[in-house]
Image: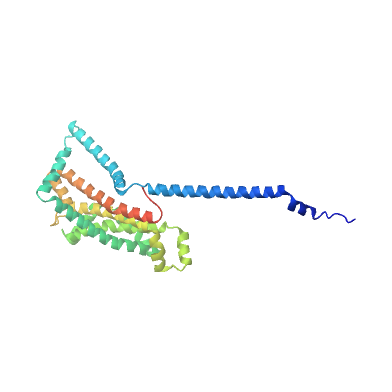
Amino acid sequence: MPAPETGSAPAAASMTDPAADTTTDASTDTSTDTSTDDARSMASGLDALETHAEQKRSRPQRLLAKATPPLLAAALVLALWQAVCLLNWSEVLPTPAAVFGELGDAWSDGTLLPAIWHSTLRCVFGFGMAAAIGLPLGLLLTRMAPLRTVLRPTLTAVQSLPAAALVPVAIIALGNSEGAVYAVVLLGAVPSIAVTVIATVEQLPPLLLRAGRSMGATGLRGTALVVVPAALPGFVSALRQGWTFGWRALMTAELITATPLPGIGQMLAEGKESNSMSLVLASVLLILAVGVLVESALFQPLERRLLTNRGLDIP
């Protein structure tokens, strides 16, 4: 009688054993259930994200939410200001009503709107020229290390100068003219823009620049296709800082120079000459209002759009 084949017994057992089939099916069903649960969890997470995106507040609600804190802060300042005046804690501080009365008088005699218009127009033109000079200058210095080594300390030194030190130089060189005012604005804004651009480009990830070079983006092509898009948020910060420096330099220039077209700085000078604290504070409020308006209407929306396009968002 032939001996049984022991080598084929396990195979036959595995083929005929229903318990093995049951175990295999159970493990398969378990893995399938786990994969299904993971897929459902991922789908529910995506649904939650979509629901959150759909539940975002409308534009008027967002504007109201952003405007409420500054308005509350302004109301608190006015309340404290009025309290100081009522308690006679200061002999020189005028009441809010007196300050706003100066603005009303300037509106009535037709000097308020021209002053705001002349100052804003000067700063817009000066800022436009500063941006047209400062941005390319900063990019050029990032490409030319020897020139950057020479000019960067000079730009930083000019940036640290107060505008009051630049006004006499401009007046002696150009006289009491619009050219002197624009020169002060340029000297105040261009170094700030150029230095900020240099710092922004220097902080770009080296891996990004190497990746661009490996794909052939070198020289001007690399600057246009890699450096500029990557540094756009920093460029917006450079323009914002340039506007701030230019606006402050313009107010100093208008305060000192005697230009034929009066601006807010001339109103400030008139208040100083007439020893009118209410007119001085009214001019200060106008300066603050224009600065806040430009910031909230121009730079904040531009920065928000750039960050949103990059998958980021700011509250």
Residue 19 versus residue 149 in the image, above or below: above
- Residue 81 against residue 177 in the figure, above or below: above
Q: Could you say where residue 297 lies in the image, as x and y percent from the top left?
A: 27, 52
* Total residue callouts: 0
Rendering quarter of residue 311: bottom left
Q: Residue at x 22, y 35 (%)?
A: 79
Q: Is residue 83 above or below residue 156?
A: above
Residue 282, image quadrant: top left
* Residue shown at 34% from the left, 55% from the top: 305
Q: Whole-percent x and y of residue 224?
A: 38, 65
Front residue of 7 and 169: 7
Residue at position x 33%, y 64% in the image? 136
The percent position of residue 86, horizontal first and vertical second, equals: 18, 32
Residue 168 visible to an observer of this rendering: no
Q: Position of residue 187 (x, y in %)?
A: 26, 58
In front: 241, or 56?
56
Residue extending furthest left?
109
